[in-house]
Every structure is written in C-alpha cells, then in structure tokens.
Amino acid sequence: MLQAAVIAILVTMVLALIRAFLGPTEYDRMLAANSFGTKTVLLLSLGGYLLSWNSYLDVALLYALINFIGTIAVMRFFEYKHPMHEGGDSGGTQ
Amino acid sequence: MSVLLELLSGVFLLAGSILCITGGIGLLRMPDFFARVHAAGVTETLAAPLLLIGLMLQMDWSLDLVKVLFILLIVLATNPTASHSMAKAALHGGQRPLLADNDNDNTEDASSKA
C-alpha cells in the first residue's frame, strides 16, 4: 500500500507540473509550485521509508519549512508589486 | 496487533492517495484561480496528515516517529497559511473570482476596472 501511495503522489506531481507549465497567471504557477513542494515532502517521507534511506526525514522537515517560506516570500512580492507602482504614478501626477 | 496496524495503515494511505489525486485533478481542471486554490489547498491539508499517519502506523518506536509527527504538524500549520496568502495576493493583484452573472468577464477587464 505504501507503493500505491508513492505512485499516487507521483501522479499528482505530474498534474501539478502540467498546471505550472500551463497556468495563465503567475499565481497559478506559484500555486502549482507550492503543491509540488508539499508533494515532494510527502514523497521524501514515504519513499525514504520504503527504500530505507538514512536521514530522509531531516531533509523532508527542512523542505517543508523552505517551501512555506518561499511561497510566502514570492506571494508577498506579487502582492505588493503592482499597487506600489500605481500608487507612485498617481501620486506623481496628482 | 501487527495485522490490525497494517490494515489501519493501508486504509489511511489509501484515503490519502485518493485525496491527493483528487487535489491534482482539481488543480488541473478548475476554471478559476480561486477554485484552484480551494481544490489544491483543502485536499492537501487533509491528504498530507492521512499519508503521514499511515506512515507512522507502519514505523516502530524511534526518533523518526517524532520527526514524522513534526512534519505533520508543520504541514498542517503552514499549508492553510500558504493557501490564504496566495488567495490574498491574487485578490490584491487584480484577480477577481469567476461569478455567475459576469460569465465572460476576463481578469484584465476586472483589473482595469478596479
């Protein structure tokens, strides 16, 4: 059953990659990248236990934290990129 | 006892796998960004704990069990926060949800109106 879960995670990663390449906006790509990162954490945990790797859980723990920080950072950048330019332009013309 | 744990772990892993694939299909096929956030964020938040609990039921008592528990808690805390951040950034960046009354309303139109 662990093998079936690994295969399901791999299928979901392929679907997220298709959305990341296909996405109309940058938000879609970042959503797919975040989903891909979460699935990577799950794949590291399950696949590392299945293949009896050495210190896979440390890598998975670190990847979960970095995935969250990266998503928050890129989304804050997207959030404040447009209104700062528009506010600066309107303030200059007024 | 071991057979029971194996069976319970199989049930958890199967439910997590089904939710995982459902989230991926929803991420690919939903028409709108906010619907995609809903499809991906909600299913991932339940799929990751189900898969990790299914893994924890197969492991023996060691430090690795605690590490998997920490991964579960981190994913459970950060995944809804990331989904909320993405939806908020998209809403502030000019994306509008696809509603029923303005069915041919594009995102460029909404951003130029706003």
Image: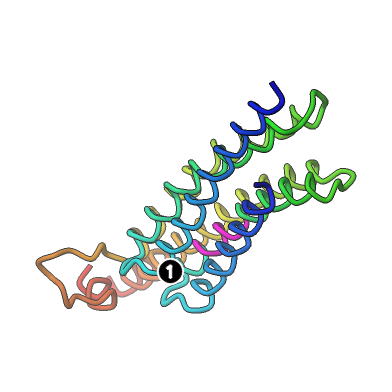
**Is B92 situated above or below B15?**
below
Highlighted range, magenta: A31-37
Task: Give the x, y percent position of residue B102.
Answer: 13, 70
Does A33 appear in magenta?
yes
Say which residue appears at 55% left-offset and 45% top-offset: B14
Say which residue appears at 62% left-offset and 56% top-offset: A37
Q: Secondary structure at mark 1?
A: helix
As rendered, which of A41 and B61 lies closer to the eye? B61
Q: Is residue B36 left or right of residue A59?
A: left
> Can residue B94 be seen in the rendering of this structure?
no
Q: Residue furthest left?
A: B101
- The image quarter containing residue B53 is top right
Task: Give the x, y percent position of residue B6.
Answer: 67, 33
Give the residue number, with chain letter if any, for mark 1: B28
Say which residue appears at 27% left-offset and 72% top-offset: B111
Q: Residue furthest top?
A: B1
Q: Residue furthest front?
A: B3
- The amino acid sitting under disc 1 is Leu
As rendered, which of A42 and B110 lies closer to the eye? A42
As rendered, which of B22 and B94 lies closer to the eye? B22
Task: Give the x, y percent position of residue A31.
Answer: 49, 61
Q: Is residue B98 left or right of residue A50?
A: left
Main secondary structure type of the part rendered in magenta = helix
Say which residue appears at 36% left-offset and 73% top-offset: A89
Does B37 appear in magenta?
no
Chain bearing mark 1: B
Quadrant including the C terminus of chain A? bottom left
* Number of disc labels: 1
Crowdedness near tag 1: few (<14), some (14–19) or many (≥20) residues, C-alpha within 10 Å: many
> Can residue B8 be seen in the rendering of this structure?
yes
As rendered, which of B60 and A91 lies closer to the eye? B60
